[in-house]
């Protein structure tokens, strides 16, 4: 087990390094970082000063080392617009994004899993068709379109819900649905295929041969085993939702990290944009590592793969 | 020489509706200049700004789907927007597919440290959520169609690389490859003649599924202002322009482009699903 943990953590560190290297390389390859770091409206002297200050006249490997060591210590730069460290901004807004993502995740689980199960168990029936349609639409209709349409119907026309902002549960409803929409479809499809696969397996056939009532077969045996990949996906989806809610948060003026990214882009606040991308990547690498370790702990077969 | 029954079998079950939608998209994009009633970047003479569609009060058939905040014809903009979506969708997918195919084959066939290197790179790349990475790249590269295509190529190649590598690993062990190796055929020749044709099925399925994703991402990027720059009409930027008018009730500026995006992506996804089941019934879970 220890060997697995060490290797796995090693891989994660390599991934993080590659990630930071990618960000580092991309920024330098697409232009002069000094221009980006100094912000709009700078003079030539400002640029030269910035270069010395930020060590941009140093050779690339040295720059990279500084970059990484700063990042490890938590220094990801300072926002132009807000004049506070990026890290502070990030952690201030993160809880909002987490809240939104968690509600969206719950929606996706509550709607997606049952539909997926029904679709698999009653394969070929009307319910299956409904589920397939929901799945298709969820994957195809862009979430920000759903968001805009919902605002149009529920905020402008019916005036039931507020169009933007944060504060009460009414503010949460539309953004969470818009965000979770895609993931309902994703959960549904995975539950369905996982369930179908499990229902086809040997021990299910044995349970049926033994004469167990169908309901018991499904709930007690099939369902639990089919859930394993679904829960993994749920964990990954949560992290993804936190990070891709950019447009939803922008439309609904939800003060999360997605909106922070949008502000960063609009105001050319480069440290914010770069910091967010790195933190997003770090979060995903971290969560993947955690999930893998938990799985290795639960299922010994994985450790020896 | 294929038996004549094979063509008929191949065309069985072709999803008609998605096919029709996609065909309509392609034709609209190609013949936009001929189909569109007006120049999409110029206000329509004889119509007001924010004119509603013709079936509503105040609308007229001069601009059947109404006009936007500059008085430009919505229908024409939708038609020309199809061109952008198609162009970006297809080329973006091809670029991403090309990179992914190359790296996947290299990793799968050569193995060893090449495999390790590519896999670690893929893992690292996959750690970045697509949308965020696309936004990041687009913000750095600046707006513009060719930049967007580069962005998509760089963001979406990982999916291809992973899956194709897996396929190549299996293919590598097959008899005909082994035979070619023993016979002394050079590696590039083996790859071109034996490996590539056999991964093409998977590649095509992945491509068809990626097109939808790319189109939505392009719409998202344009919506955020880092995609196709104005005044080129793009469905995403039409949605962005329409955002401020939503509260005032000019729904057609939002709903129509959104419906176009949804319809095209839906068609692409359905088509991709059909292709996947058709080409290789074993792999239903790509």
Image (spheres, coloured by chain):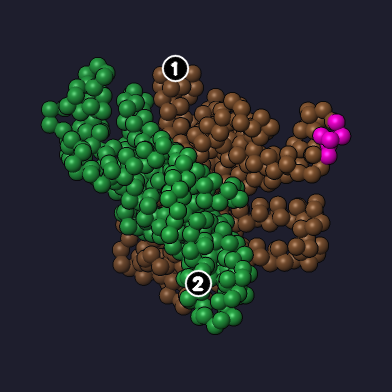
Chain colours: A brown, B green
Residue under pointer 2: B191
The magenta stretch spans which residues? A206-211
Residue sitting at x 49%, y 66%: B196
Query: For numbered disc 2, what is the local secondary structure?
Result: helix
* Camera-nearest residue between A204 and A157: A204
- Asked whether disc 1 touches disc 2, contact meaning CB atoms under 8 Å apart, the reply is no
Output the chain of dot 1: A
Q: Within the magenta stretch, is there residue B89? A: no
- Residue at the image position 46 percent from the left and 22 percent from the top: A154
Look at the numbered disc 1 and give the secondary structure of its residue.
Answer: loop
Residue A5 visible within the image: no
Q: Is residue A207 magenta?
A: yes
**Residue B238 picture location, percent across and down:** 32, 38
List x then y, in percent, for residue A41.
31, 57
State whether residue A87 is above or below residue A3: above
Label 2: how many Cα within 10 Å (few below 14, some 14–19, many 20+) = some
Which residue is painted at 34% across and 31% down in the image?
Answer: B256
In this picture, residue B237 sits left or right of residue A87: left
Instruction: Count all numbered tags in the image, as a single digit.
Output: 2
Res. B74 visible in picture: yes
The main secondary structure of the magenta stretch is helix
Q: Quadrant of residue A65?
A: bottom right
Chain of residue at mark 2:
B
Pointer 1: residues within 10 angstroms few (<14), some, or many (20+)? Answer: few
The answer to which image quadrant residue A116 occupies is top right
Residue placed under numbered mark 1 in the picture: A158
């Amino acid at each position: 087990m220890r060997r697995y943990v060490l290797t796995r953590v090693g891989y994660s560190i390599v991934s993080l390094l590659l990630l930071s290297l990618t960000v580092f390389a991309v920024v330098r390859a697409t232009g002069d970082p000094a221009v980006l770091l100094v912000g709009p409206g700078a003079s030539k002297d400002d640029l030269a000063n910035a270069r010395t200050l930020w060590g941009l006249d140093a050779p690339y490997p040295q720059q990279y080392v500084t970059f990484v060591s700063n990042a490890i210590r938590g220094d990801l730069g300072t926002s132009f617009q807000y004049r506070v460290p990026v890290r502070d901004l990030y952690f201030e807004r993160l809880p909002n994004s987490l809240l939104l993502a968690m509600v969206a995740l719950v929606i996706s689980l509550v709607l997606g899993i049952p539909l997926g199960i029904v679709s698999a168990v009653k394969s070929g029936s009307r319910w299956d068709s409904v589920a397939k349609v929901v799945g298709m639409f969820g994957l195809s209709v862009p979430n920000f379109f759903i968001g805009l349409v919902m605002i149009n119907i529920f905020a402008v026309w019916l005036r039931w819900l507020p169009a933007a902002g944060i504060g009460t549960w009414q503010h949460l409803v539309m953004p969470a649905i818009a965000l979770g929409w895609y993931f309902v479809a994703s959960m549904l499809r995975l539950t369905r295929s996982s369930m179908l696969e499990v229902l086809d397996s040997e021990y299910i056939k044995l349970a049926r041969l033994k004469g167990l009532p169908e309901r018991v077969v499904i709930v007690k045996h099939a369902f639990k085993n089919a859930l394993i990949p679904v829960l993994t996906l749920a964990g990954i989806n949560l992290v993804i939702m936190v990070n891709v809610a950019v447009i939803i948060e922008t439309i609904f003026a939800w003060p999360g990290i997605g909106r922070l990214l949008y502000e960063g882009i609009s105001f050319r606040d480069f440290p914010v944009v770069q910091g967010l991308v790195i933190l997003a990547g770090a979060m995903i690498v971290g969560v993947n590592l955690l999930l893998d370790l938990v799985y290795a702990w639960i299922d010994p077969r994985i450790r020896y793969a | 020489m294929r038996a004549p029954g094979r063509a008929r079998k191949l065309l069985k079950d072709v999803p008609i509706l998605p096919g029709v939608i996609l065909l309509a998209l392609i034709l609209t994009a190609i013949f936009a200049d001929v189909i569109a009633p007006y120049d999409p970047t110029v206000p329509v003479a004889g119509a007001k700004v924010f004119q509603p569609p013709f079936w509503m009060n105040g609308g007229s058939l001069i601009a059947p789907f109404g006009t936007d905040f500059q008085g430009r014809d919505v229908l024409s903009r939708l038609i020309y927007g199809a061109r952008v979506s198609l162009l970006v969708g297809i080329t973006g997918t091809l670029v991403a597919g090309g990179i992914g195919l190359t790296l996947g084959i290299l990793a799968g066939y050569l193995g060893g440290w090449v495999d390790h290197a590519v896999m670690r790179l893929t893992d690292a790349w996959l750690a970045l959520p697509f949308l965020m990475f696309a936004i990041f790249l687009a913000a750095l590269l600046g707006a513009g169609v060719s930049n967007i295509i580069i962005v998509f190529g760089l963001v979406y190649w990982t999916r291809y690389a992973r899956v194709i590598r897996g396929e190549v690993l299996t293919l590598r062990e097959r008899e005909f490859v082994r035979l070619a190796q023993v016979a002394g055929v050079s590696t590039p020749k083996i790859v071109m003649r034996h490996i590539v044709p056999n991964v093409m099925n998977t590649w095509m399925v992945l491509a068809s599924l990626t097109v939808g994703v790319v189109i939505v991402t392009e719409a998202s990027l344009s919506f955020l202002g880092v995609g196709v720059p104005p005044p080129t009409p793009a469905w995403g930027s039409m949605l962005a322009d329409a955002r401020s008018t939503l509260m005032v009730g000019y729904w057609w500026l939002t709903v129509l482009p959104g419906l176009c995006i949804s319809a095209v992506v839906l068609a692409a996804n359905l088509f991709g699903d059909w292709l996947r089941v058709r080409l290789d019934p074993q792999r239903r879970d790509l």
